[in-house]
């Protein structure tokens, strides 16, 4: 069983790969930021730049979609995949910005662990997206999608564990509110990665 894509003038594969690459960059930046425990201006600016670059590619995909008659797979799937890849980057930017607004500093072991899992998931997303070019990569793409699903389950378990720990040990209600939002947002990133995996799997099935 395999799948094939029609050649197109607009190279959506390159654009999707760039977008997935920015998701990895955003995840790596987030990991570096929480591992360092400080919100310095350089790191914040780097995350802003990645978010803007990701938006640029998303707009390029959607503009190309409006101008291209022949597409490699369903137009709706192209739109959905572009939107969800962009959501990964936007969500990571939202977390960092929220940490800035809430003035959350210091190394939080739970956030560091979330960041590690998020980076793993984004790298798996990138592998899945890169593999879409060629039907010979069907098994590898499916493997990456399974890994993304596994990491989302890891994220669910982590969220429940850290929230339970937060409610049990933290006495300051304002800190509880702040950290609860940040932890839940971190888990949401993994949910969005899983959404991307589902779209990729759906595309492969349709093109089989």
Image (cartoon, grey):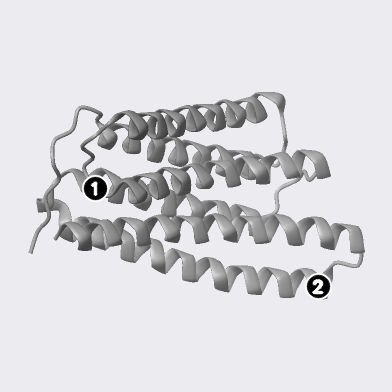
- Looking at this view, is 125 or 79 the one in front? 79
Q: Residue at x 75, y 45 (%)?
A: 106
**Are dots 1 and 2 in contact, CB under 8 Å?**
no
Residue 11 vertical placement versus 103 (above, below): above
Mark 1 and mark 2: Cα distance apart in space:
46 Å
Q: Residue at x 31, y 55 (%)?
A: 200
| Residue 87: mark | none
Q: Secondary structure at mark 1?
A: loop
- Residue 163 as seen in the image, left or right of residue 69: right
Picture quarter with the N terminus: bottom left
Residue 21: image quadrant is top left
Could you tell which of marks 1 and 2 lies nearer the N-terminus? 1
Q: Residue at x 49, y 27 (%)?
A: 53
- Looking at this view, is 187 or 73 the one in front? 73
- Residue 88 as seen in the image, left or right of residue 47: left
Q: Secondary structure at mark 2?
A: helix
Q: Does residue 205 appear in the picture of this structure?
A: yes
Q: Residue at x 58, y 42 (%)?
A: 90
Residue 57: image quadrant is top left
Residue 34 vertical placement versus 117 (above, below): above
| Residue 167: mark | 2
- On the image, the x and y values in percent for residue 141 come to 24, 56
Give the residue at mark 1.
73
- Residue 30 as seen in the image, left or right of residue 1: right
- Residue 23 as seen in the image, left or right of residue 200: right
- On the image, the x and y values in percent for residue 59 come to 46, 30
- On the image, the x and y values in percent for residue 167 come to 81, 72
Q: How many marks?
A: 2
Q: Does residue 103 appear in the picture of this structure?
A: no
Mark 1: few, some, or many residues within 10 Å (few <14, many ≥20)?
some
Picture quarter with the C terminus: bottom left
Closest to the camera, between mark 1 and mark 2, is 1
């Amino acid at each position: 069983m395999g799948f094939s894509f029609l050649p197109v003038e607009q190279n959506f594969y390159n654009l999707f790969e760039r977008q997935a690459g920015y998701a990895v960059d955003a995840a790596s930046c987030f990991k570096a930021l929480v591992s360092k425990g400080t919100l310095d201006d350089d790191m914040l600016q780097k995350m802003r730049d990645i978010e803007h670059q990701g938006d640029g590619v998303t707009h390029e995909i959607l503009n190309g979609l409006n101008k291209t008659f022949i597409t490699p797979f369903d137009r709706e799937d192209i739109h959905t995949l572009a939107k969800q890849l962009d959501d990964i980057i936007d969500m990571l930017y939202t977390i960092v910005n929220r940490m800035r607004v809430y003035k959350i500093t210091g190394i939080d072991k739970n956030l560091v662990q979330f960041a590690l899992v998020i980076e793993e998931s984004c790298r798996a997303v990138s592998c899945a997206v890169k593999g879409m070019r060629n039907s010979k990569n069907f098994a590898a793409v499916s493997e990456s999608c399974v890994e993304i699903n596994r990491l989302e389950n890891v994220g669910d378990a982590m969220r429940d564990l850290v929230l339970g720990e937060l409610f049990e040990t933290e006495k300051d209600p304002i800190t509880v509110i702040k950290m609860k939002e940040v932890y839940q947002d971190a888990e949401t990133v993994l949910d969005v990665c899983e959404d991307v995996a589902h779209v990729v799997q759906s595309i492969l099935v349709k093109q089989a």
